[in-house]
Image (cartoon, rainbow, N blue to C red):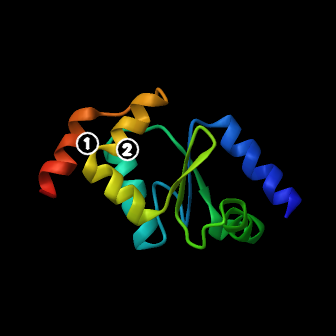
């Protein structure tokens, strides 16, 4: 686990926003990963994507690192934010916008508003 933990910490420290997911941001391999990547992509967020299917050590390591059993997992400034359900709720409530604002993450505020309008 220590090698995986070191690699995860290095990735999180080198990138403001990181999504550990099944597949890539351009080709998600599961519906939950697709939903979170879709939100980030639509909002124009620059983020690193880590395909856990390509690395079994990271796939298990990220679960141990966060003490969260599922993937995808979103990190902002090295802090675990949550998985698909939490990100969906935060997007719809505006909490994700607030988190991005607080952490100086660039995103399209109008796109975030359109997501909320479409789900109202």
The answer to whether mark 1 and mark 2 are in CB contact below 8 A is: yes
Q: x, y percentage for residue 84?
A: 42, 64
Q: Which mark is residue 44?
A: none
- Residue 95 falls in image quadrant: top left
- Please state which of residues 107 and 120 is positioned toward the viewer in this rendering: 120
The answer to whether residue 34 shows anywhere in this view is no
Packing grade of label 1 (10 A; few <14, some 14-19, many >=20) is many
Residue sitting at x 54%, y 65%: 23
Side (left or right) of 9 relative to 21: right
Image quadrant containing the N terminus? bottom right
SS label for mark 2: helix
Q: x, y percentage for residue 65?
A: 72, 60
Give the answer, above or below, for where 77 lies relative to 34.
above
Packing grade of label 2 (10 A; few <14, some 14-19, many >=20) is some
- Please state which of residues 71 and 101 is positioned toward the viewer in this rendering: 101
Give the answer, above or below, for where 10 lies relative to 80.
above
- Please state which of the two labelled residues, at mark 1 or mark 2, is closer to the viewer: 2
- Residue 45 falls in image quadrant: top left
The answer to whether residue 13 shows anywhere in this view is yes
Which residue corresponds to mark 1? 112
Image quadrant containing the C terminus? bottom left
- Residue 77 falls in image quadrant: top right
Residue sitting at x 48%, y 54%: 25
Residue sitting at x 60%, y 45%: 79
Quick one: which residue is furthest to the right in this view?
A: 2
Distance from the alpha carbon under mark 1 to that under mark 2: 9 Å
Q: Which mark is residue 96?
A: 2
Side (left or right) of 20 relative to 29: right
First in residue order: circle 1 vs circle 2: 2
Give the answer, above or below, for where 31 lies relative to 116.
below
Side (left or right) of 29 relative to 97: right
SS label for mark 1: helix
């Amino acid at each position: 686990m220590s090698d995986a933990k070191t690699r995860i910490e290095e990735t999180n420290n080198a990138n403001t926003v990181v999504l550990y997911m099944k597949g890539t941001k351009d080709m998600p391999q599961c519906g939950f990963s697709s939903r979170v990547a879709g939100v980030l992509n639509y909002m124009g967020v620059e983020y690193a994507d880590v395909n856990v299917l390509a690395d079994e050590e990271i796939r298990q390591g990220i679960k141990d690192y966060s003490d969260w059993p599922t993937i995808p997992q979103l990190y902002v400034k090295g802090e675990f934010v949550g998985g698909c359900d939490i990100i969906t709720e935060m997007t719809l409530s505006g909490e994700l916008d607030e988190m991005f604002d607080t952490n100086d993450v660039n995103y399209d505020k109008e796109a975030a508003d359109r997501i909320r309008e479409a789900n109202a």
